[in-house]
Amino acid sequence: MAGEMVSALVVGTRRRIVDYFTDAGATKPDAALPYAPKGRLEKRLFRRMVDFGLLVEVKQGRFWLDQD
């Protein structure tokens, strides 16, 4: 049961990060937005998304969501 709760928390946090960028239309480099993750889990997931290439930094602290 604890594992399911953690999984749900991770999925929800990822979704909030993705929604932040998609809702604002930050899906191309010229629409990059500043983003400052809050909390340890959000910081960890955000960094993983950047490392994976899902979020791309164009300027220091400004990111866009690569949906390809």
Image (spheres, rainbow, N blue to C red):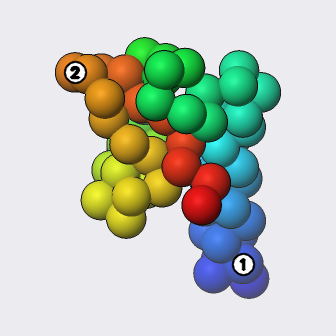
Question: Quadrant location of the N terminus?
Answer: bottom right
**Is 2 placed above or below 44 here?**
below
At 65% from the left and 72% from the top, the residue drawn is: 7
Q: Which of these two is toward me, 13 or 61?
A: 61
Mark 1, Cα crowd under 10 Å, few <14 / some 14-19 / many 20+, is few
Mark 1 or mark 2: name the one nearer the start of the chain. 1
Disc 1 element: helix
On the image, the x and y values in percent for residue 56 come to 38, 42
On the image, the x and y values in percent for residue 60 come to 22, 21
On the image, the x and y values in percent for residue 49 come to 43, 56
Distance CA(mark 1)–CA(mark 2): 35 Å
Q: Is residue 51 left or right of residue 29?
A: left
Say which residue label 1 marks.
Answer: 4
Q: Which label sits on residue 60?
A: 2
Amino acid type at image mark 2: Gln
Q: Is residue 36 visible?
A: no
Toward the left, the furthest residue is 60
Question: Quadrant location of the C terminus?
Answer: bottom right
Q: Is residue 25 left or right of residue 45?
A: right
At 43% from the left and 17% from the top, the residue drawn is: 34
Q: Is residue 17 left or right of residue 25?
A: left
